[in-house]
Image (cartoon, rainbow, N blue to C red):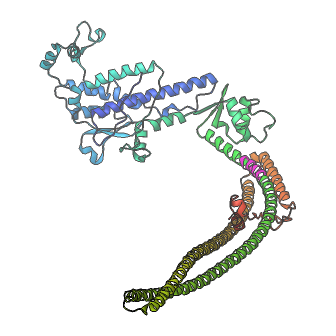
Amino acid sequence: GILDIFGFELFAHNSLEQLLINYTNEQLQSLFNGVVFAAAQAECKLEGVSMAAFDESQVDNREVLELFSAERGGLIATLNEECIFPKGTDDTFLDKFVRANGKNKRLIQDSGPRAATPGFTVSHFAGVVRYDSDGFLVKNKDPFSEDLAALLRGSSEALVAALFAAPTAERTSAKRAGPVQRLVFRGVAPQFEAQLQRLTRVLSAGQVHFVRCIKPNNAKVPNVFDEDKVLHQLRCGGVMEAVRVFAAGYPDRVPYETFVGRFTCLDPCADPSAGPAAGADGAAAKRLLAAVGIEASEFALGKTKVFLKSGVMAALERSRERLLAKQALAIQAAARGMLARRQVRETLLAAREARDRQRKSDESAKRLAEMEAKAEAERRAEQEAAEKRAEQARQHAEQIAQEEAEAAAARRRQEDARLAEVTTAKQRVAKLEEELAALKASHAAALEATSQAAGADSAAKASAEAAAAAGEEIAQLRAAVRSAEAESGELRKELAAAREEKDRAEARTAKVRAEAQATNEKWQATAQTAEAEARRQAKIRELERIYNNDRLADITWERDFWREQMHSRILQDVEKEEAQRQPLLVGVGKALATAVSSLTDKITATRRAPLQRADSRGASVLGGGSEFLPVVPTPTVRDVNPGCRTGAEAAAGA
């Protein structure tokens, strides 16, 4: 089962309730002391160890229990007896109790200002508590109306009736009362004590475990410990007393095999080839304790265990931790030396690889520079040739356009001349037609006058001949006009063809000019791209140079730092070893000194070994001295970005 009780209570005003609770804690503390000491005594008896070292009086609280539970003069008996007397008061109870227990060391007489209020002070295991005696008798009597009790006993509820079925008085035993039984008053305190005794018997009959609960703070927040509150609870909960109980006698009981196996490293005379628990018995444990300087009064040897007094185990653990720390330093130094040598080898290998990569990178850069120069020369030659072809095409187009313009102007002049001739011919035709009309009119007039004049026949004949000649001339002129018009049509066709040819020539000229302009712009864009790429490559090289310089400075600083740390640690270890060397650790000290000396010789030999000098373009190492300086090679653009295109490659791609 699980028993949960109130902890020790200590308030500004303490009454009967606090007294009974603290009495319960005293009773359980006595049970705790008995369980612990009984277990210790049983184990010591089983191991054959003397119990003289166990001083149970240091934690014995029987005086407090007698102060409360004694049949004559005890607090509970006196209180119950005073409740029986009709004229009993709190003051008469206090006076009887103090007079009956004046010799008890746990009862402290009131003196000074605090004596103005009636009460008494008890020295508990958890602290000193003063109890105010006012109201003790009333609380112990716990008066209850008999009419109300009768009413509740007659309740229809079975539970209520059962609770109030028993009378408030109990019958004494026949042996004490004799043939006539009488009723004896028992107040709250005696009933509480009887129940506590029954509980103690139940606890004593089982296997008891104790749990101490500590409340770290009143705010109920994590990771906050109120020191005063925690300390008060440790005292009131009996933890301090429990520590005293455990510390009395031999708190540490370790089997021989575990003890010798764990602490045999502290014995300088132990055989390292033997196992850690070889010969683990009482003699080995005694020899080990004597070797580390533990006095015989601080331990006891049992059949299977070694019993150690308080503080011995902690001292052994501290000595073991110091020894392991020194050995760990030696192991760490050897491991760090191995790692340093491995790192040096890896650094040298990386330096050689970096030198090879740098050489290949330089060769690639040289070939790349040659390719860039060649591509630049080809680009310039091609640009010059394109410009020359564009200029020739422009001059040829201008010449063709000029010739076409001159031919068109000549044809226009010829056409204008022919048009002028046609116009003149048309004017002559019109004039001749007018003359012909006039002759026809005169001929008609002559014919009319034929009858009038006989000699008019010759004039009419002459006019008819003149009219015929004029008609022939008119026909000739008309034929000339038609031929002139046909020639003019041909000239117009030739002029239209010339104009079309001129337009085609101008279109070809514009096309050639556009192609030349586009080619020029293209080469200009290519040149700008190449210049930008060249600037970017230069910037990348500058950043790589800055990064390599910073990395070189970091490596140099780190090398100097670790060299100083190694020297200082070796010196500190040597100084500590010389200052803290004790006679019982002579063997271990010699072994550590030998290991440090060997490690120092190896480190010195490793440093003085001549290191291979590397090329200045790769990784250089200062050989023959006590330090080395790795120089990280400068990565190229190809190493930073393998997919990067140079200016020459961009121009070639264009």
Q: Position of residue 402 (x, y in %)?
A: 62, 83
- Say whether residue 330 is magenta: yes
256 relative to 462, above or below:
above
Q: Residue at x 72, y 41 (%)?
A: 266
**Viewer-proximal residue, 647 or 55?**
647
* Highlighted range, magenta: 327-339
Residue 627: in sight, yes or no?
Answer: no
- Say whether residue 428 is magenta: no
Q: Residue furthest left?
A: 147
Q: Quadrant of residue 84?
A: top left
Quarter containing the N terminus: top left
Q: Position of residue 252 (x, y in %)?
A: 60, 33
**Viewer-proximal residue, 618 or 612?**
618
Q: Residue at x 62, y 38 (%)?
A: 313
Q: Position of residue 646 (x, y in %)?
A: 70, 65
Q: Residue furthest front?
A: 454
Q: Position of residue 573 (x, y in %)?
A: 73, 55
Q: Quadrant of residue 191?
A: top left
Quarter containing the C terminus: bottom right
643 relative to 539, above or below:
above
**Viewer-proximal residue, 56 or 166?**
166
Q: Residue furthest top?
A: 179
